[in-house]
Image (cartoon, grey):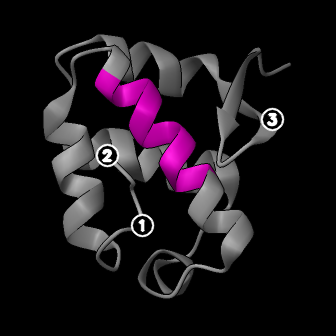
Amino acid sequence: MMQVICFLMSIENETMAIVLSTGVVKSLQSTCDASNVVAQLQETLELSEEALENPDPETTRLIRSFAMIAKGENRLDVVEHLRQMTPAGTTGV
């Protein structure tokens, strides 16, 4: 059974929950390479490369939420990696 952690976030006057596996959270809190953290995120949220390159509004909110979590964990390398993989303005950070 996969354990998950839920984060509640308020973005653009909208509250949303993002649920991440403990594996993603642990890798975010470790010194794991940024590309590995993002790959785990993609797997957990079932996001394709296409979804990152051309995100719909829901995917954009998910990416922003994760970027805020990464920034809060002082993983600016993960935020930067997300910025490189997504269109300008997607991460919102």
Residue at 86% from the left image edge and 19% from the top image edge: 1
Q: Provide the residue span drawn in magenta.
A: 62-71
Q: Amino acid at mark 2?
A: Val
Q: Answer with mark 3 or mark 2, whichever residue precedes in sequence.
A: 3
Q: Quadrant of residue 28?
A: top left
Residue for badge 3: 15
Q: Is residue 61 visible?
A: yes
Residue for badge 2: 93
Q: Is residue 50 left or right of residue 35?
A: right
Neighbour tally class for label 2: few under 14, some 14-19, many 20 plus, Cα within 10 Å? few
Q: Amino acid at mark 1?
A: Thr
**Mark 3 → mark 2, Cα distance in angstroms:** 17 Å
Q: Residue furthest front?
A: 13
Residue at 42% from the left image edge and 84% from the top image edge: 53
- Element on which disc 2 rests: loop
Q: Does residue 55 belong to the magenta stretch?
A: no
Q: Does residue 63 belong to the magenta stretch?
A: yes
**Mark 3 → mark 1, Cα distance in angstroms:** 18 Å
Residue for badge 1: 90
**Mark 1 → mark 2, Cα distance in angstroms:** 8 Å
Tell me whether circle 1 and circle 2 mark residues in contact (CB < 8 Å): no
Q: Is residue 18 left or right of residue 69?
A: right
Instruction: Label the magenta part by its dominant secondary structure.
Output: helix
